[in-house]
Amino acid sequence: MLGAPGVGKGTQSQILSRSLNLPHISTGDIFRDAIKNKTPTGIKIEGYVQSGKLVPDKIVISVVEERISKKDCVSGFIMDGFPRNITQSETFEKLIKKLDLPPPIVLNIRCSKNIIIKRLSSRRVCKNCGKNFNLEFLPPKKDNICDDCKEQLFQRPDDYPTAIRKRLDVYEKETKELKNYYNKKKLLFTINAKGNIDEISKQIHKKLLSNNI
Ligand code: AMP
């Protein structure tokens, strides 16, 4: 799944993961977990993630290789947040060849910058279970409290406006080449993220079906 931070690719990846019965792998989630659990990788990458910078390719690639080599990935997986640049996508190509998997189907979810900034700055996450809420579109039933586990919600430091702008700049710079790369290989399918979660999900499924994927 390709898409700027805040286009809803995490949510759409989860829906697709359920409907296709394939694991959802989010490098951002893996990194946030590693930071929370203070693992050696978490300690190394904390500064990058919290300031909205990309984690060095070497670390990202070794984390991805370890995850996609697991048994639950033999029939495929939904990859969310990776690859983010050409080096990562070239290495990913080698990895999937080594694992005997077919080339990826790249879904590019597009959305305007203003909508993204509005969405991200109103996102809140549960401290305990990680569930996402949005003050604008999906508010919790009780102010600042998770509907499921009743713990407090917080704002991710990388969802502060300065970090959002940084993430969008980084995203644009890094993925321009990436989109060209997959477009040339005829693996890129673009979805305009207009409407609510259900409508966007329907568009994605329609696109996959109409392309015989
Ligand atoms: P995300 O939740 O996908 O927006 O990722 C959150 C943060 O994790 C990013 O701002 C980066 O610091 C880091 N990150 C996630 N995936 C990658 C990747 N493929 N390459 C480099 N850094 C990444």
Image (cartoon, grey):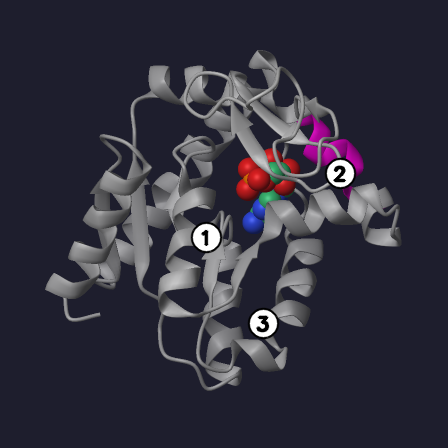
The residues bearing labels 2 and 3 have C-alpha atoms spaced at a distance of: 26 Å
Residue 128, numbered circle: 2
Main SS of the magenta segment?
helix
- Is residue 195 placed above or below 63 in the rendered structure? above
Query: Extreme bottom residue here?
Result: 100
Start-end of magenta stretch: 44-51
x and y percentages locating residue 140 in the rendered image: 55, 24
Residue 14, numbered circle: 1
Q: Residue at x 29, y 23 (%)?
A: 112
Residues packed near mark 3 inside 10 Å, few (<14), some (14 to 19) or many (20 plus): some
The disc, 3 or 1, on the residue closer to the chain's N-terminal end is 1
The residues bearing labels 3 and 1 have C-alpha atoms spaced at a distance of: 17 Å
Q: Residue at x 71, y 42 (%)?
A: 32
Task: Select label 2 or label 1 by which is in front.
Answer: 2
Task: Select label 3 or label 1 by which is in front.
Answer: 1
> Residue 172 appears in which quarter of the rendering?
top left
Find disc 3 in the rendering and name its residue: 68
- Is residue 79 placed above or below 50 in the rendered structure? below
x and y percentages locating residue 71 in the rendered image: 60, 82
Q: Nearer the viewer, residue 208 or 86?
A: 208
Under 8 Å from ligand 1: the CB of mark 1? no
Is residue 161 left or right of 138 when viewed as pictured? right
